[in-house]
Amino acid sequence: MKIIIVEDEALVARRLERLTRQALQDDKHRITLKSTLEDAATYLYEHPVDVLLLDLNLNGRDGFDLLKMAVSGSFHTIVVSANTDRALQAYDYGVVDFVPKPFGIERLRRALDRCRSAGERSPHSTKYLAVRKAERLKLVDVQDVRYIRGAGVYSELHLTNGGVELHDKTLSRLSDLLPANFLRVHKSFIANLDHVQHFRSHGSSKYDLVLENDEVLPVSRSKYKELKVALA
Amino acid sequence: MHLSKPTCVNSNLRRLKGSIQLLALLFVACAPSTSGVVIRPSEPARLLDWRISQGDDLTWALPEYDDTHWQQLDLSRWNFDESLLTGRFWFRVNVIVPAASAERQIGLQFFAVTSAQEFYWDGQLVHTNGVVDIDTRSEIPGRVTGLVPLPYELTAPGQHQLAIRISNFSFADEPRFGRILIGQLDGLRHEIMRHEQATIFLTAVFLTAAIFNLIIFLGFHQRIAYLFFALYCLFHAGKIGLRPTWIFKNIDLLSLPFHWEAVLWCMLLSGFFLVVFLLHEFSVPQREFWTWALAGFTLLSYFWIPTQPFVVLSSGFAFLPAIYAIRKNMDGSWLSLVGLIGFSLLTYLGYQNLLSFGYFVGSLFFVSCMTLSLGKQIGRQERRRQEAILKSSRLENELLKKNIQPHFIMNSLTSLQELLEQDSDRASQLIEALAEEFRVFSKVASEKLIPIAHELNMSRAHLRIMEFRREAKFTLETRGLNGDEQVPPAVFHTLIENGLTHGYAGKQCGRFVLSKELEDGRVRYGLFNDGHLEPSPAGARGTGLKYVEARLEESFPGCWQLCSEPIDGGWLTTIEITSDAK
């Protein structure tokens, strides 16, 4: 895994690095330390990473700007911060976990595990998905998303207003963050069950979902049972 | 027509008041000698128009004595020849008892008639005041005032004759003839009682106001304006109470001048303190100068300016501070103007005889207005005091919170956690630094000013903590401090903390310099750091800087300046304190 740690306190940064290595239990991971927002942003722009460990209060500046940018990226974000009163807000924006300072190895391992094991939902699902539009970020309310379609390393967010936005995260990373009414119905589709009209069976184990705007999404055979329970 | 029919005039008089009444009285007094002054059932008449003769002859007391060749003397004219009233002389006047007054007892009331008198009614001696004699040694001055009931059998309806045998040697250099009233006895008594009651009431009210304001002065911050107002009320009480008529009615004529002198000084001083009070109440610029100027004017007035013009002038002066206060939009300014206008108006009505005790009722109105204003002021002061207490405890809270705010404490604990696992010696040192900072914080949080040594201790403890956390080297140097400086708690600590937080991203060392300079009684503290701080947007002030400003304002209200700006090689925050060289 490629991990970046953004933390302005040298000692804490060192601790994060040390405990991350210990938690991941092997040396195949590349860990980078950055102490300022600018350095971190530049690095993220040029290098693909899997996990960002982010302190929200860097050099007296609010890390939420970086956070919004970070959650639009393809990687998962773990916030490591002293200001626990901002944890819920961070979850709303789509972080995988919020690790309060001070922390030990167990808590950090749990957060890292969430990033590694696909399909495990974060304890608080996101409210917004940050979408990178030329030079700026747009926050999309997850309840405005009708379904999401995987498109290689990107995802297409199909919105209730008919619009389509591209998100940098893969379908599996998104499904880690989304609330319970979003279900991975197919290897290429996540459906918002709130916008499903009905569920059809065509015999011979072929199923699909009809959305309220009459669009039809395919359903994998393996997902059928889960879907049936969810819609019951 | 009125002159020839005085009874008709009288019936009209009943319906008229004030100055018209005075004029009518004159007409009555000027009526031909065959008629004389008519005793009115409504109110006593003042005897103003006399026939006077120098010398002494007991036959002049007889009603049949023909005095037509005697000199006429109109006491209502202020420019009569006062030398007539020295030595030995007689006054005579005709009085008519109307049939309507036949059933009632008639009386005379005299006030301040110099020096000794014998009163004859139709040739009979009815009252002696002092001893009438031929020179200063043998003459004995009488009482200032007295009420003479006339025997019932002597006041049958018809024309009577009042003669007064007078000697004035004791007051020859300043002869005065006060006033003599004649009327129904119960009417005279009623008038006396009315004046006595009013005098006692007004004196008591002004004395109470004086005591009240004195207590306010002593109890509330010793504001000098309250003392002046107390003195204004006190001298007002004196001006009314010391008048030798109503409260001091049984004094002899020899002490009369002292009373008048006392009343005159009370009047001058009440006028003086009225203006001085307003000057100080509204903190008029150069009020010390104006106070002295007014004192000079008051002293000069004693010798050269008569009473009434002085009252008019001093009241006029009183308007100036009130108008100044209104222009400056000060609290209570309008109330004082309303008080002054009411005072002037009521006084004017009093002088015009349209309102008895007009001047004093006016003063009472003004005192009421100012007391109301004072009450509001005390209310406001109390609120401000409460707010100041609240503000102090808010600042104390804020300071303590800085020490336990999550960002600081949680990051410190995380660093400590790391050191405990990796380097227990340094962990122990970090704990010591944290303890030191916390110890000083809790000691100084409730103080307004603390010794600079405490401030330096906690700043250095903070730098040490940050050295561990950032794995960097920070130094704090001092210049020009002599160690006995007193500063508001955590002011420099906060500035250092601000500098560390914003100016040392990724830097491995930092240098802070606290310097002090003295210049023209001003103290200038400078705190320099070599960090790279971004100037904050105009108008934006971080919570740290707001805390510093609030502390400075609490300890040096209105006497400080704070400037925070980038300079060559770093950032400089300057605090300049203009008073209190410490």
Image: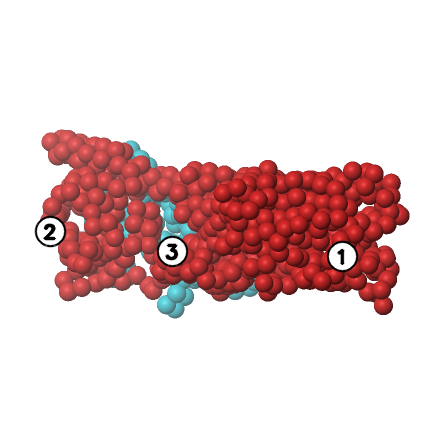
Chain colours: A cyan, B red
Chain bearing mark 1: B
- Compared across the picture, whether B39 is left or right of A93 comes to right
Q: Position of residue A197 (x, y in %)?
A: 63, 52
In the rendered structure, which amino acid carries the disc numbered 1? Asp
**For the residues bearing labels 1 and 2, Cβ distance under 8 angstroms:** no
User: Picture coordinates of residue B8 (x, y %)?
Assistant: 87, 60
Numbered circle sitting on residue A68: 3
The answer to whether the residue labelled 3 contacts the one labelled 2, judged by CB atoms less than 8 Å apart, is no
> Could you tell me which residue is drawn at 89 percent across and 48 percent down?
B99
Q: Residue at x 18, y 64 (%)?
A: B567
Label 3 secondary element: helix
Relative placement, left or right, of A79 versus B43 is left
Q: Nearer the viewer, residue A198 or A36?
A: A36
- Helix, strand or loop at label 1? It is loop
- Say few, some or many: other residues with alpha carbon within 10 Å of mark 1 (under 14 / 14 to 19 / 20 or more): few
Q: Position of residue B265 (x, y in %)?
A: 47, 50
Q: Which chain is indicated by disc 2? A: B
Tell me the number on the disc at residue B480. Answer: 2
Q: Against B291, is B385 above or below?
A: above
Say few, some or many: other residues with alpha carbon within 10 Å of mark 2 (under 14 / 14 to 19 / 20 or more). few
Residue B323, given in percent of the width and then of the height, sits at 50, 63
Q: Amino acid at mark 3?
A: Lys
Q: In this image, B201 relative to A32: left or right?
A: right
Residue at 10% over, 51% down:
B479
Going by the numbered disc 2, the residue's amino acid type is Gly
In the picture of the structure, the residue carrying the numbered disc 1 is B66
Report how far apart the C-alphas of labels 1 and 2 lie in the structure: 105 Å
Query: Can residue B513 be seen?
Result: yes
Q: CA distance from mark 1 to mark 3?
A: 123 Å
How much space separates mark 3 and mark 2, taking CA atoms? 48 Å
